[in-house]
Image (spheres, rainbow, N blue to C red):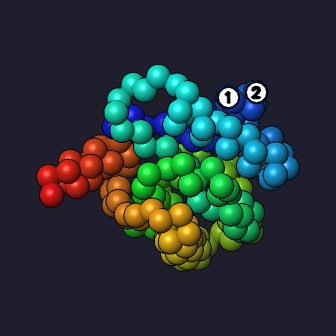
Amino acid sequence: CEVIKGSTLFMEWLGIEPYNYAKLISMPNDYKDKEMGKMVNWIVNGRIRIKPNILFDAHFLNFNHGVLTDVTGAWISQMNIYFVITAPSDEILTRIENDEKISGRERPLFNEIVDRAAKIDKLRSYQKMTVDRAHELGAMYGKNVYEILNKNGDLASAANTFIDNLTRG
């Protein structure tokens, strides 16, 4: 399975320097939706595939400064299946904290929330809303929705295990 990091490729597509999420967030949503549609169409129809299955790693919802924004558009209808990658909320928070320490990247997710338990509750709520949105889109576009547990943080491994289990039957 080829994993395409949606935000990384999208920033490159838009000419934004890597990891400049502040610039990406500041752009108008209608412009981003239009450009995401063009990029996804290119991924699905125009580029040479490295592997037969592509996992486009992107969010259904973005969570910034404590506010959720739906970042899906008509482009999502080009996907064959919708996956929601999940992990226990405390593990997700630990991954976020470790990434911030290692990379120096600041993620403005929680606004003024400083309590770890409150952050975990917020992440749990965000995950539920993401699953709900995926099912809404699945019903709207006639797509199957699957949840994949990614406990170890290796998205490609989790996806390949899921695909192998699905094709075996």
Badge 1, how many Cα within 10 Å: few under 14, some, many 20+? few
Between 9 and 126, the one nearer to me in the picture: 9
| Residue at the image point whose x is 67% and y is 56% from the top | 73
Q: Is residue 97 above or below residue 47?
A: below
| Residue at the image point whose x is 56% and y is 54% from the top | 77
Left or right of 51? Residue 96 is: right
Q: Amino acid at mark 1?
A: Glu
| Residue 47 image point, x, y percent | 52, 25
Q: Amino acid at mark 2?
A: Gly
| Residue 27 image point, x, y percent | 84, 46
Between 113 and 34, the one nearer to me in the picture: 34
Q: Is residue 101 above or below residue 124?
A: above
Between 129 and 112, the one nearer to me in the picture: 129
The quarter of the rendered structure image containing the C terminus is: bottom left
Left or right of 48? Residue 106 is: right
| Residue at the image point whose x is 80% and y is 41% from the top | 23
Q: Is residue 62 visible?
A: no
Which quadrant holds residue 113?
bottom right
| Residue at the image point whose x is 71% and y is 60% from the top | 64
The circle on residue 12 is 1
In space, the residues marked 1 and 2 are separated at their CA atoms by 5 Å
The quarter of the rendered structure image containing the N terminus is: top left
Badge 2 marks a residue whose secondary structure is loop
The circle on residue 15 is 2
> Quick check: marks 1 and 2 in contact, CB under 8 Å?
yes
Badge 2, how many Cα within 10 Å: few under 14, some, many 20+? few
Left or right of 89? Residue 73 is: right
Q: Is residue 150 above or below residue 1?
A: below
Badge 1 marks a residue whose secondary structure is helix
Count of numbered tags: 2
| Residue 14 image point, x, y percent | 75, 32
